[in-house]
Image (cartoon, grey):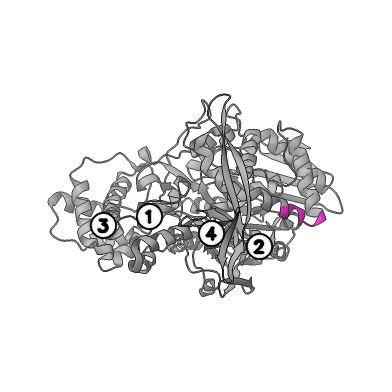
Amino acid sequence: MITRDAWGIPHVTGGSVLEVAHEQGRATAQDRAWQLEVERRRSEGTCAEVFGATALEWDLLARRVQLVDLARRAYDALEPASRAFVDAYVDGANDVLDRPWRPWTPLGVFAVQHLLFSRFPSKLWQHHVASVLGDRAAEALELLRTEGLPGGSNAVAADGALTASGLPIVAGDPHRVIEAPGCYAQVRLTCTDPDDAFDVAGLTFVGVPGVQHFGHAGDVAWGVTNAVADDEDICAEELQRHRGAVVARGRGGWEPVVRRVELVRVRTGDDTWDAQPVEVLVTSRGPVVTGGPGQPDTFSLRTPAGVLDDLGFDALLPLLRSRSAADVTTAFDRWVSPVDNLLVADTSGHVEHRVVGRVPLRADGGWTGWVEDQPRRTGPLLVSANDRATAGFSRIGDDFAAPHRAHRLAEVVADLAASAPLTPEALGAALADDRQVAGEALLSLAARLADLSPAATALRDRLLAWDRRMATDSVEAALFASVRAGVVEAFATAPALAGVDSSPFGELYAPWFDLRGRLRIALPALLAAEKPFGVDPLQALAAALEEVAVQPDPAPWGDAHVVVPLTPEQQLGLPAPDGHAPPWPAVAGDDDCVLATRALGGTGACVHGPVARWVWDLAGDSRWVVPLGASGDPASPHHHDQQAAWAAGRTIPLEDR
């Protein structure tokens, strides 16, 4: 049975776990049929058949990385109960969909969501920097150290000693590209089987059964952030054609490469298509994702999921059946990737942060096993923001988010708790904190400047007096962003970085090769360095202040910093269909705020930010919100009825349990 609350969010009830899965699939297809069609095509590499040549790059990558093959192998390897659960979900979706899904399609959709969410695009960027800068690359990469892309997720867990109810609260907000419809769907799943009863509310990837990353199961609640672990490898390959086959140079000499040729249909008109061949190659190290025989920059990709033929779906049923923090952590023992920071709490008062997923142990260029002693900690207040939370994180990687967001979120929550017991609304509001924390480095440097013109001095003093909030009505926030952009431009145009600001691997990877974006997020380190890339930070900042000071005051930050949820067409460089683009509200925040709403170019529209905001109160007063709404149909009253609350940093109540 499917019922819906005032926001159109589905409440699925079934007499068995398989009935729940079936009805969840049916509800998802009712709400998001077109989105499910797009996600299926993304997993199969058939987007260009509908969207044309602009989708070809994605289709080629999906084919080369063999998303369907991985999904089928992982489906075949599922435990029988997990496979039946997925089958029931697909059957329910197929009751509604015009083009039926295959049994393994949910696994392919899940793989799509994490393919470019992983570390390998940044590793391609690091290789590019090394090839362009040569001996100077190590210094550059150290200065530009970052998790990959600006912005990131947050999560916080507070135990009952800090809350108004006396029970723990867990809250967070995953940050991704903001899509229309959104990648996450709100759902409540209730099984009335007395021998297998559960009642779980949470967020699920559209097209994936159960509740994965963020859930509230009554006595226990959990959520994740990306742990930014070093869990994948790109391997430089030398490939050659030999007697009609392809061979790769290995340690022992030339070795065979598994090869097949597939055809990708590319729409060229209303009723016309071309066929684009793609050579799919797999070496002993993994599928080849760039280059090819005789080509430079040829890399294969090795992932835990590919090595294990496992996408972690055997964790889904145990998560639904969890009653305690121990149950949740045991369920996540089956997690594979992405490697996540799991924050979990239960009504017994247990609050814990632990890293979950598979991180390889490496020796002699190969993988020899998995890191077993992954970081974990407990405490009354735990915060995770993609940062190096403890020294033990060195066991899982070496490149994490700067600590600014984590420190600011911990400070905000601690201040709230010191003034009054924490409530769900207060904790949700903390996730929308818009103070520009990393900008402290730029403003501190500005305070040291001398010999500025009167106009630049006045601008500098105005920024020093600013409350540092990237609020929508703040002119000073817009001025700060303009000055920062000028400093970034001084570094980006430095001769020492010539050739770095480009992607040799195509437009699909362009966001990871955006030099100005990387410079912006690394600015505190650059401003503290001694003439990085030959640029004097003081001179660069003085020049930026002088340039901005002679211009008229910009409009308030929110005039340009509007959220633009991207339809599938817009993500592929096409215009949104008529009536499909939701409104563009102003939104606070910035790259370096807890509310990490990334502005294009550092000063423009926002296309990357929190794709949900959730607050799980174990006393029962939980809240959540998504950027748009429950429905993917632009004509539905629930298409973007949550957008105003989300843009204002608020949440809506979760239906009483």
Q: Quadrant of residue 287?
A: bottom right
Marks 4/2: CA–CA distance: 21 Å
Query: 10 Å neighbourhood of mark 2: few (<14), some, or many (≥20)?
Result: few
Q: Residue furthest front?
A: 243
**Residue linked to disc 4:** 239
Is residue 40 in sight in this rendering?
yes
Q: Earlier in the sequence, mark 4 or mark 1?
A: 4
Q: Quadrant of residue 139?
A: bottom left
- Prevailing secondary structure class for the magenta stretch in the rendered image: helix
Tell which tag, 3 or 4, sits nearer the viewer.
4
Q: Which mark is residue 307?
A: 2
Check whether the beta carbons of the residues at disc 2 and disc 1 lie within 8 A of each other: no
Residue type, label 3: Ala
**Can you give x and y, in whole percent of width and height, for residue 318 in the image?**
75, 58
Marks 1/3: CA–CA distance: 26 Å
**Residue linked to disc 3:** 494
Q: Which mark is residue 436?
A: 1
For residue 81, side relative to residue 402 (left or right): right
Q: Earlier in the sequence, mark 1 or mark 3?
A: 1
Name the secondary structure under disc 4: strand
Marks 3/4: CA–CA distance: 36 Å
Name the secondary structure under disc 3: loop
Residue 278: within the magenta? no
Marks 2/1: CA–CA distance: 41 Å
Query: 10 Å neighbourhood of mark 4: few (<14), some, or many (≥20)?
Result: many
Q: Which residues are magenta?
A: 73-80
Q: Earlier in the sequence, mark 2 or mark 1?
A: 2
Q: Earlier in the sequence, mark 3 or mark 2?
A: 2
For residue 83, side relative to residue 413 (left or right): right
